[in-house]
Image: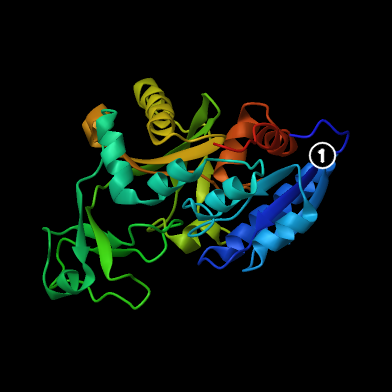
Amino acid sequence: MSSRTNPKVVVLMGGPSFEREVSLSSGRECAAALRGESFEVVELDADADVAQRLSDLAPDVVFNALHGRWGEDGCVQGLLEWMGLAYTHSGVLASALAMDKHKSKAAYRSAGLPVVDSIIAAKADVMADHVMPPPYVVKPNNEGSSCGIYFVHKAANGPPKLGDDLPLEVMVEHYVKGRELTTTVMGDRALGVTEILTDGWYDYDAKYSVGGSRHEVPAALPAKITEACLDYALRAHDVLGCRGVSRTDFRWDDSQGLEGLVLLETNTQPGMTPTSLSPEQAQVQGISFGALCRWIVEDASCQR
């Protein structure tokens, strides 16, 4: 990052993905926080001319507040590497690997981390017959924020009828009941464990609608479960090659003790509003939202 008094930070936000509105919200909040930390800040809604606009702006750091495909799957990271710009969060490979749920599970297994059994199947086959015994979940292999998820109950009369929003190949994952837990990693430090409480499925609306979910942080858990979440999140961050801030989600069947804890996925660019999960965990550790955003910018680099 530049040594000048007020480094210029471009907050990259919006973009064309399904998660555009979430990204705009994160970007605006981060931009405001960074201005409060005395950075020169420009908000940039990413479009097809993003490379030209970044070239014209010549930032010291690009704060990547994009969510979903193109923004956190290695695409924009590759562009920023090509342009030689310092940027935040994970690099090309870690971003692409974490976004691909099937491949990230292979990485987790190589590190001895517990995951849920799943397969990649043709959408047509999934609609024709059960490809695994219910209950199971059908979802895109490379989207975030619980987009396009279908839950097939144990008592389902037949296979699911999937919408046009799903790709031709999907992930079919054994459903594991239990409590929703999540842990943020900041550099080489796991910040804590949050339990996410909802009245139903933790889907897109539950994540982002007002009152859709409640967060208990720190979560009221047995010490060994808290310790395992912190350990697993750090190991997931490392095996994927993440940089900066990441957040790993878990499900825990408390009737099975430690054996009931499984990793679901790692988010390389967690939501970044003051009330999002990762900033909440940072706040509990005495790290304000502004300080968290400053740390993310100061951690930025190229060739990540």
Label 1 element class: loop
Q: Nearer the viewer, residue 120 or 190?
A: 120
Tag 1 residue: 7
Q: Position of residue 259 (x, y in %)?
A: 22, 30
Q: Position of residue 56 (x, y in %)?
A: 78, 58
At 51% across and 52% down in the image, what residue appears?
72
In the rendered view, would you say 112 is above or below 289? above
In the rendered view, would you say 284 is above or below 89? above
Residue 273 visible to the viewer: no
Q: Nearer the viewer, residue 251 or 4?
A: 4
Question: Which of the 4 image quadrants contains residue 121?
Answer: bottom left
Residue 37 lies left or right of residue 133; in this view the side is: right
Quadrant of the snapshot with the C terminus:
top right
Question: Which of the 4 image quadrants contains residue 137?
Answer: bottom left
Q: Position of residue 262 (x, y in %)?
A: 29, 38
How many numbered marks appear? Answer: 1
Q: Position of residue 186 (x, y in %)?
A: 56, 30
Question: Which of the 4 image quadrants contains residue 12?
Answer: bottom right
In the rendered view, would you say 193 is above or below 104? above
Q: Nearer the viewer, residue 20 or 53?
A: 53
Coloring basis for residues: rainbow
- Kind of residue sitting beneath label 1: Pro
Residue 77 lies left or right of residue 252; in this view the side is: right
Residue 140 visible to the viewer: yes
Q: Looking at the image, which residue sits at the far right?
A: 5
Quadrant of the snapshot with the N terminus:
top right
At 35% across and 21% down in the image, what residue appears?
224
Q: Nearer the viewer, residue 104 or 181?
A: 104
Label 1, residues with CA under 10 Å away: few <14, some 14-19, many ≥20? some
At 23% across and 52% down in the image, what residue appears?
175
Residue 304 lies left or right of residue 104; in this view the side is: right
